[in-house]
Image (cartoon, grey):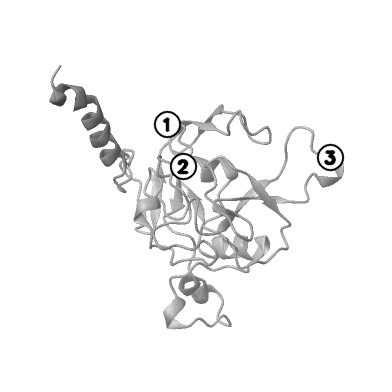
Amino acid sequence: MTWKRRCLPFWFLCVALVACSDSDVEQIAVTVPPGVTVPESMVYIPAGEFVSGDPSDPKTALGKRVHLDAYLIDRYELSRGEYSRFDAEYKVDASVVKFPKTQISYERAAAYCQWAGKRLPTEQEWEKAARGTDERKWPWLLYQPHPNNGFSGFLPEPVDKRDEWISPYGVYGMGHNIWEWTSTDYDYNGMPGDDKGRFKVIRGGLLQSHLKIDFTPTWHRNYMDPRARYNFLGFRCAKDI
């Protein structure tokens, strides 16, 4: 066997690794039905099944197949500039109008969505928009160590900045920027009765400690007191068809 033949498997492996390192996220082809108008700021998620949760996390749906009707969801987390149109007393500097609106309670986030003719997404709607229908663990499919690409993770970034981390439906910020409110009550098998109804599910933020930051899997569930207001907690809206 010649040297070239011996090296062919290694060469193909290198080509595969280079191909997999492409930052473009493969998108799911979606056909919008006639008569349905999709605002530029929103994404159409078609009706159908997806896999919710994962067997590795007992507080999720464990990989259950769930059917959802079609719906719309905001392409971006709500920005400070957009929020200022709702709250006349909220002043925002021009340099940060594209940054996500944070430090907002569940009730106030829901009020904005209602004002905009929308609503907060359910937890399952959020998860399907993040992971698509191929059971992907990360919105962008392939694992990446974190932090990278100049993103520290400790401070939010503009809502439209990271197209290399979009979901298979083209939704931004689902797994790296901030945690987001959903309309779903936090619950799980074996949850103490006193805790039921106390918290709301939040999705999509980072798992971080003093020195380490990790991306959250698409199925990862977190929870928060609805009255909470933090600089890592914001939201996006959804809408029925």
Task: Locate residue 210: give its quadrant.
Answer: bottom right
Query: Of marks 2 and 3, which one's residue comes earlier in the chain?
Result: 2
Which residue is pictured at 65% across the width and 48% down the height?
Answer: 222
Q: Is residue 174 left or right of residue 227?
A: left
Task: Locate residue 40: give its quadrant.
Answer: bottom left
How far across and how far down the image is residue 154, in percent? 55, 64
How far across and how far down the image is residue 64, in percent? 57, 27
Pointer 2 residue:
138
Disc assigned to residue 71: none
Query: Of marks 1 and 3, which one's residue comes earlier in the chain?
Result: 1
Secondary element under disc 2, as helix, strand or loop, is loop
Pointer 1 residue:
134
* Picture quarter with the N terminus: top left
Which of discs 2 and 3 lies nearer the camera? The answer is 2
Measure the alpha-carbon separation of dots 2 and 3.
Answer: 30 Å
Disc assigned to residue 192: 3
Which residue is pictured at 31% across the width and 44% down the height?
Answer: 21
Q: Residue furthest right?
A: 194
For label 3, the crowd category at 10 Å Cα-Cα, with few meaning under 14, some 14 to 19 and many 20 or more, is few
* Picture quarter with the C terminus: top left
Is 131 above or below relative to 3? below
Indicate the amino acid at tag 3: Pro
Q: Nearer the viewer, residue 28 or 122?
A: 28
Which residue is pictured at 44% across the width and 62% down the height?
Answer: 151
Measure the alpha-carbon separation of dots 1 and 3.
Answer: 33 Å
Is 14 above or below relative to 199? above
Indicate the amino acid at tag 1: Asp
Indicate the amino acid at tag 2: Trp
